[in-house]
Image (cartoon, rainbow, N blue to C red):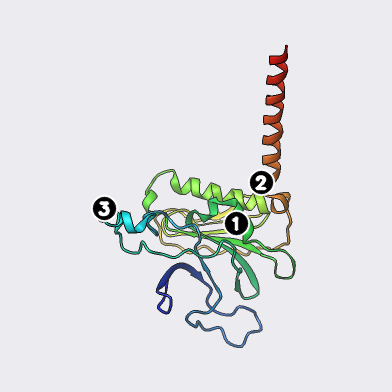
Amino acid sequence: MVDYQPETNKAFNNIIALGKKYSNDSFGHYKYLHNNRFSKHHLLPIGEFVPFESFLRKLGPLFDLPMSSFSRGAYAQDNLIANDVHISPAICFEVAFSNQVRANIYQGEHASDLILTVSNDAWFGNSHGPWQHLQIAQMRAIEFAKPVIRVTNNGITAVIDGSGMLVKTLPQFEAAVLTHELKLTTSNTPYYQYGNLPVWCVIVIFIAILIFKRKTLQLK
């Protein structure tokens, strides 16, 4: 949803949670600007923000699209909470950024229970794009051993379990409702602990070996 905040003259691309945060809450109605929300951080260039805005907007209508002046949400934000469930959100192609998804998954008392990604895949049409987007979401499930709920308008809505397997899907270009009972478990994976650090270490070691071998050959 579009969240315009008149006091700051800023607009955000948001997910909001409606209803009760906790099962023992007495009220669960929505109140504007409540804090049970997530603001998109990775904005789409041109579509959601214009780089070098003061210069490019003057060049032509391509750079003056409506709804292209969103403000960026924080890199790490609180999880959404719905009926005691802690949800780590990712809007659209944010799910492709594993480091950001990792920054929004929490352990401890308020540990994240699942990952939710919502997307408008209409511009991909009937191409491989929605399937590729789905596979990216499956990778996040594998990395963090957490279920992923993926909701799209005409892409592929799916439930993915903590091993990255598709549990349930909806067909594209059909109006339908998907229901599934998720089993929530705690998880703490090596990727959550160390991120891409092991990969960078391997790359550095590999480069060091190549440099050493090259110098050894030069000495011979």
Mark 3 nearby-residue class (10 Å; few <14, some 14–19, many ≥20)? few
Q: State which tag comes first along the sequence, 2 or 3.
A: 3
Give the left or right position of residue 137, taking residue 173 as reference: right
Q: Amino acid at mark 2?
A: Asn
Whether residue 53 sits left or right of residue 72 in the image: it is left
Q: Are marks 1 and 3 in contact (CB under 8 Å)?
A: no
Which residue is identified by label 3?
Answer: 59
Distance of mark 1 from mark 2, alpha carbons? Answer: 13 Å
Residue 217 in the image, given as x and y percentages of width and height? 70, 15
Q: Nearer the viewer, mark 1 or mark 3?
A: 3
Q: CA distance from mark 1 to mark 3?
A: 35 Å
Locate residue 105: give its quadrant: bottom right
Query: SS at mark 3?
Result: loop
Secondary element at image label 1: helix
Q: Residue at x 73, y 49 (%)?
A: 190
Per the rendering, the mark at residue 101 is 1
- Residue beneath the point at 66% across and 64% down: 113
Query: Is 127 in front, or is 34?
Result: 34
Which badge, 1 or 2, is on the more N-terminal residue? 1
The N terminus: image quadrant: bottom left
**Residue at 68% over, 25% down:** 211
